[in-house]
Image (cartoon, rainbow, N blue to C red):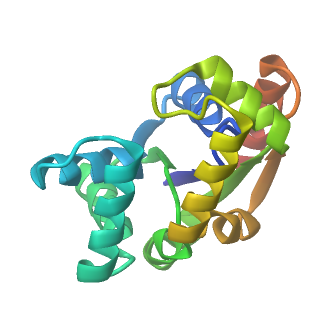
Amino acid sequence: MHIIGITGLIGSGKDAVANHIIKKYNYKHIDFGDIVRDYATKAGRTHSREDLQATRKDFDQTRGKDFFSKDVVRIIKESRWEKVVVTGFRNPEDVEPMRIELGRDLIMISVDADEQTRFKRLKKRGSPRDPKTIEDFHLQEKTEAEIFDVRTVVSTADYHINNVGTFDELKAMVDNFMRGLA
């Protein structure tokens, strides 16, 4: 079994890495965000960044910070998938239960990029929840840092990809990583 966890700060290129692995290497995909969105919907909340953060915080306080991670492990085990990409890690508690349950089958990748590169990508992406100004970007990062501990998750990754080049360069780095798994 190969479970690849992908983490990184907003705009670093996590989805680009995940999508490349999913398409080229035929991996299944689980996103913590999709699970949180499902619970937010059930709670009558919207899918705005603020409501999703509030949903996550509520579950952390009422069901434990490892609730969503345990749900991901359950999904992987019930589905019996052999190759899975998991995205949306926000806290060390997202990783630890998976490391305990999956052992060496879980490999964490951190996708890194400098602040300016990440902000430019978010502006180009143009999602309604993405920041429009550098000030909005800083505020969004500050808010996420107050709620989540992504930087700690990034620091504990098994493999780091510095995503400051072209998309082709990123794919080449991912392909190099995937060759190492075989």
* Viewer-nearest residue: 103 or 34: 34
Q: Which image quadrant for residue 61? A: bottom left
Q: Is residue 118 something that shows in the picture?
A: yes
In x, y percent, where is residue 181? 70, 48
Q: Residue at x 49, y 54 (%)?
A: 1
Relative horizontal placement of residue 73, taking residue 106 as reference (left or right): left
Q: Residue at x 35, y 41 (%)?
A: 48
Relative horizontal placement of residue 62, taking residue 15 as reference (left or right): left
Q: Residue at x 21, y 51 (%)?
A: 40
Q: How many marks?
A: 0
* Viewer-nearest residue: 118 or 88: 118
In x, y percent, where is residue 12? 71, 40
- The C terminus: image quadrant: top right
171 above or below 104?
above
In x, y percent, where is residue 167? 77, 20
54 above or below 64?
above
* Viewer-nearest residue: 176 or 155: 155
* Viewer-nearest residue: 121 or 35: 121
In x, y percent, where is residue 101? 43, 75
Q: Is residue 182 something that shows in the picture?
A: no
Q: Residue at x 56, y 59 (%)?
A: 144
134 above or below 4?
above
Q: Which image quadrant for residue 159? A: bottom right
Q: Which image quadrant for residue 152? A: bottom right
